[in-house]
Image (tube, helix red, strand yellow):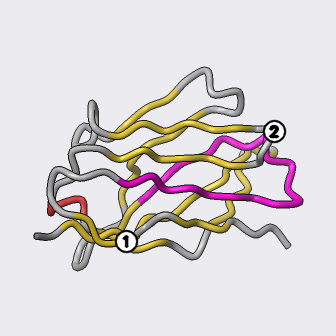
Amino acid sequence: QVQLVESGGGLVQPGGSLRLSCAAPGFIFRIYDMSWYRRAPGKERELVAAITTTGGSTNYADSVKGRFTISRDNAKNTVYLQMNSLKPEDTAVYYCNARRPVLGSSVNYWGQGTQVTVSS
């Protein structure tokens, strides 16, 4: 059973920073593309940031470009999301996703989510 464990969420004031972590113990982490998604109240889940297996390529939602940075440490089986200049609209549950293409489809694993609340 693959388990992705997010941590680092919490309450922060506008303009503040948080660093989310997603650990994948006992998992062949290095062969999976990793992503962070979020779901705000009353909204659909959206992709926030993604990183390829080696970390050589990343992409971001327009709403977070220049403020968020995704990175990974394959030796620690962990992916990170550094979030700076946080805004109230960043309030959401953030989910870690691991994805690997398999035979024209894909295998996906999800974490349980970590709440991020941006409020004064």
Residue situated in front as seen by the camera: 48 or 91? 91
Name the secondary structure under disc 2: loop
Callout 2, which amino acid? Ala
Name the residue tied to disc 1: 10
Quadrant placement of the N terminus = bottom right
At x 63%, y 38%, the residue is 72
Give above or below for 58 relative to 64.
above
Labelled pair 2, 1 in contact (Cβ < 8 Å): no
Residue 53 position (above or below residue 104): above
Instruction: Locate the C terminus and report the quarter of the image it occupies.
Output: bottom left
Q: Horizontal and vertical percent for residue 19?
A: 45, 52
Q: Is residue 66 above or below residue 97?
A: above
Q: Residue at x 27, y 42 (%)?
A: 64
Q: Is residue 112 magenta?
A: no
Residue placed at 68% from the left, 49% from the top? 78
Residue 119: name its quadrant: bottom left
As drawn, the residue found furthest toward the left would be 120
Q: CA distance from mark 2 to mark 1?
A: 26 Å
Task: Looking at the image, tell me whether mark 2 or mark 1 is earlier in sequence order.
Answer: 1
Residue stretch in magenta: 18-37
Instruction: Name the residue: 79% across, 47% down.
Output: 29
User: In this view of the protein, which residue sits in the foreground, 94 or 78?
Assistant: 78
Callout 2: 10 Å neighbours few (<14), some, many (20+)?
few
Q: Which residue is mark 2?
A: 75
**How far across and down, in percent of the image, does residue 45 sit?**
37, 65
Amino acid type assigned to the residue bearing label 1 in the image: Gly
Other-residue count near label 1 (Cα within 10 Å), few / some / many at <14 / 14–19 / ≥20? some
Q: Secondary structure at mark 1?
A: strand
Q: Position of residue 58 (x, y in %)?
A: 50, 29
